[in-house]
Image (cartoon, grey):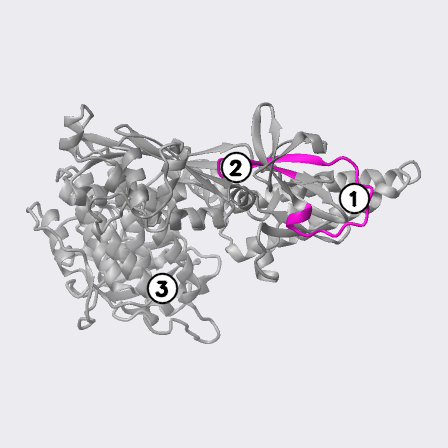
Amino acid sequence: MSDMTTDHGGAGIDLSQFYQVFFEEAGENLDRMEQQLLAIDIEAADDEELNSIFRCAHSVKGGAATFGFADVAELTHQMETLLDRLRRHELTPTAPMVDVLLQAGDALRSQLARHQGAGGEPVDTAELLSAIRAMGAGEAAPPVVKAAAVSPPPPQPAAAAQTTRGLELRVGPLSDPKDADNLVDLFKEIPDLGTIEPLDGGQASDGMRRFKVVTNSSDSDLLDLFTFHVAREAVSLLPLTSGFGFHDGAPGAPPVENPPDPGFGFFEGAPGLPGSTSAASGNGAAPVAAKHAVAPAAVPRSAAKPEKAASAALEASTLRVSVEKVDQLINLVGELVITQAMLAQNSKHIDTALYQQLAAGLANLDRNTRDLQESVMSIRMIPMSTVFSRFPRMLRDLASKLGKKVEFVTQGEATELDKGLVEKITDPLTHLVRNSCDHGIEMPVDRLANGKAEQGTITLSASHQGGSIVIEVRDDGRGLSRQKLLNKARQRGIDAPDAMTDAEVWGLIFEPGFSTADVVTDVSGRGVGMDVVKKNITAVGGTVEIESAEGYGMRVSVRLPLTLAIMDGMSVGIGEEVYILPLSSVVESFQVSEHTIKTIGGSGRVVEVRGDYMPVMDLEQIFTVPRFDTDKGPAIMVVVEAEGGRVALLVDELLGQQQVVVKNLEANYRKVDDVSGATIMGDGRVALILDVGSMVRRSRH
């Protein structure tokens, strides 16, 4: 569509300002429609489910017609026709219908992406449209090949099949009659919509404006277009009769004493009324059934007002804000946390008796800063249902391709995670779920032979544990074979003694290129890419663990921090330097003497803690910390854990617990081994945040 900006005497409309809202809402409607199609019970479809799916398609069609996206409007119109017959029980839902509607949703996403400027060729939906029309007519449709990009076909008007007709448009009463001129501008800007001319000489009568419209668009498309710019109750489409419809008793005639409530023009016989066959819609089309109404039928005003108030309250309950603005807000709160820490640090030396009000103010600032930080961080937190919602469709298609029967179960969808982490964790989770379906769940025949139900189950769950979120992918499939993994490792030259624990054996699949699949498929291979999965999870401070029982299934647990922006940490001192340990990784701390540390193998050192020996790591040596205090006292040991292992870190002192703002060291300096980031302390110094996972891996080597 070409430039949509108009300028008629200084009053212009720029439709492009609404583009982004339309694309976002269309995406949400398509996602909702897909979820409902996947969840629908074909044997006993619920009326409300069918109505909801219909509304999703109708909403997309209305917006597409408004902006002139003819291909989107045409496809959604055919979907709407099929869905309308389903919800009126004229047709019975079938699995092929669900398949075709899902494919239509995919095609719509491609079309919308192209209109949004993502590039790509026009999508060929000819077969899809033909199949939907056939199903809508009650015929058996042939299987549909997925819509593919083709060379652009000759342009055809979206409503070319409809007859051009004339009708009356009544707008008002309006507080500002100039608002009606917006509709005139719309007609001039959207190609092939038709013509419009005033019937009242361009003058408002009692706040009303009347127009003659000549168009080949349907009533529903016009109503969708007009109500995008003018309140719905202010728009009516009427028959174009002699005297332009203003004779006695005609729609829109001056009010008479005690008139019946016209219900905003949708009285008996008016165009747009369910089942209407009036002149305004007399374009040769079949009568429209009652449940196909685009606009509501007449409603008592006492009922209409509460509905309008409820709608307004719903609209006011949410606000669209760009991620950039939220990130900027989080950065500012981070700076505030640093400033508050600086004030708290400097206030330690003041006499609280002399500066009682200052001390009380600083205490309030501390409390308010933490509350503000938690509130701002909650804005960026989104529910895991956003991630989970993409898997039912993927598993449905994958199971169908593989000939398997799979039930997908989700738990903890309301659990929230930072948006930045959600984006980074989606791909690894997708790989894990595909692996479970492809190589975890057995074929139905094999499951029955092993005494299992022929339908396998894949469970995706999320829950909070301490300061972390744990996401699990479980399946009741064949599980991992310990001996098979050991044999494969030895073939690849990996040291794999029989004495290895189960956890160590399962960890072999994270080796690059390691796979136990007998046949590598185009879907996935258990082990192929698992090293990348672990790398991506580790990159955001997470860990991944595997549990498996051969013949019974497998569980992959992914543990992630709740956010990457602000964290609770424990400050430790070594010499004159300060380091930060993630509080979620700290297990315990205790004071030790040299006699409690044992040396093994000539160089390695371990410490015994309640019967368990764990490696000791001296942070002073690792980071080559200069020391000026030769009379160093007894050291303190801090036990930390990550990736299923524990180490004891030797430090000089514990400085305390505090919230720290995480700064990316790699972006501001360079990558440093055993360091995950940095923060600014209250006294202005930079403290390094230690990578506990890296420490544990170092101790193993």
Give coordinates of residue 467: x percent, y percent: 56, 36
Q: Is residue 275 left or right of residue 611?
A: left
| Stretch of the chain drawn in magenta | 620-649
Viewer-closest of 99 and 609: 609
Q: Are marks 3 and 2 in contact (CB under 8 Å)?
A: no
- Residue 8 in the magenta stretch? The answer is no
Viewer-closest of 186 and 355: 355
Q: Is residue 304 left or right of residue 213?
A: right
The residue lying at 30 percent from left, 55 percent from top is 62
Please name the amino acid that badge 3 sits on.
Gln
Q: Residues within 10 Å of mark 3 (few under 14, many from 20)?
A: few
Give coordinates of residue 635: x percent, y percent: 73, 36
* First-in-chain label (1 vs 2): 1
Please name the amino acid that badge 2 sits on.
Ser
The quarter holding residue 263 reads top left
Report the mark closest to the observer, 1 or 2.
2
Seen as rendered, the residue at the extreme front is: 602
Report the mark closest to the observer, 3 or 2.
2
The residue lying at 56 percent from left, 53 percent from top is 326
Q: Residues within 10 Å of mark 1 (few under 14, many from 20)?
A: some
Q: Which mark is residue 468?
A: 2
Q: Image quadrant for the N terminus? A: bottom left
Q: Is residue 258 visible?
A: no
Q: Which residue is mark 3?
A: 116
Viewer-closest of 229 and 650: 650
The residue lying at 18 percent from left, 23 percent from top is 451
Q: Which mark is residue 344?
A: 1
The quarter holding residue 189 reads bottom left
For the residues labelled 1 and 3, the Cα–Cα distance comes to 50 Å
SS at mark 2?
strand
